[in-house]
Image (cartoon, helix red, strand yellow):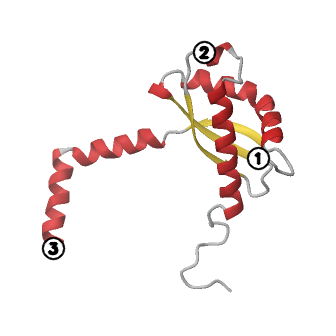
Amino acid sequence: MKRPGSPPRGARGPSQRQLRVGELLRHALAEMLERGELRDPDFAGLNLTVTEVRCAPDLKGATVFVVPLGGEGADRAIAALARAAPFLRRRLAEEVELRFAPELRFALDTSFDRAARIERLLREPAVARDISREGEDGA
């Protein structure tokens, strides 16, 4: 029986273990990229930030979210990382103690773009006026 106020079945967030393993992987991948372990010419001049790693519930797969510094070369970076995924997976197996090294998928992190868009919307005169009007009515 479902408890009142509990999330719908299957709608729970990641487990503590998924979060912990994701952070371990994020740190290890960030260090590998910082050390310049990838020799692909597409990485020349690219500075990547690993913003998040989301692990599958069984920890056999992980999506790695990255952002290129300055926002340029995103498509090139994702393609190069996809080519380097088997190498990075082997290196992760050596650096992080896990039963299985997860299969890596790479994606561009767009959360910063969305946050900037929301910030711009909130600064528009009409929206700012509506927000201040709500504050006056609710006070």
Residue in view at x 77 percent, y 53 percent: 59
Judged left or right of residue 116, residue 46 is right
Regarding mark 1 in the picture, which secondary structure is present there?
A: strand
Q: Earlier in the sequence, mark 1 or mark 2?
A: 2
Residue 44, disc:
2
Residue 135 on image: x %, y %:
17, 66
Residue 139, disc:
3
Vertical relation: 12 (above or below) 115: below
Vertical relation: 71 (above or below) 122: above
- Residue pushed farthest top? 41
Vertical relation: 10 (above or below) 53: below
Q: Can you identify the residue that label 1 sits on?
A: 61
Mark 3: amino acid? Ala
Vertical relation: 118 (above or below) 40: below
Image quarter where the N terminus lies is bottom right
Image quarter where the C terminus lies is bottom left
CA gap between label 1 and label 2 equals 27 Å
Q: Quadrant of residue 9?
A: bottom right
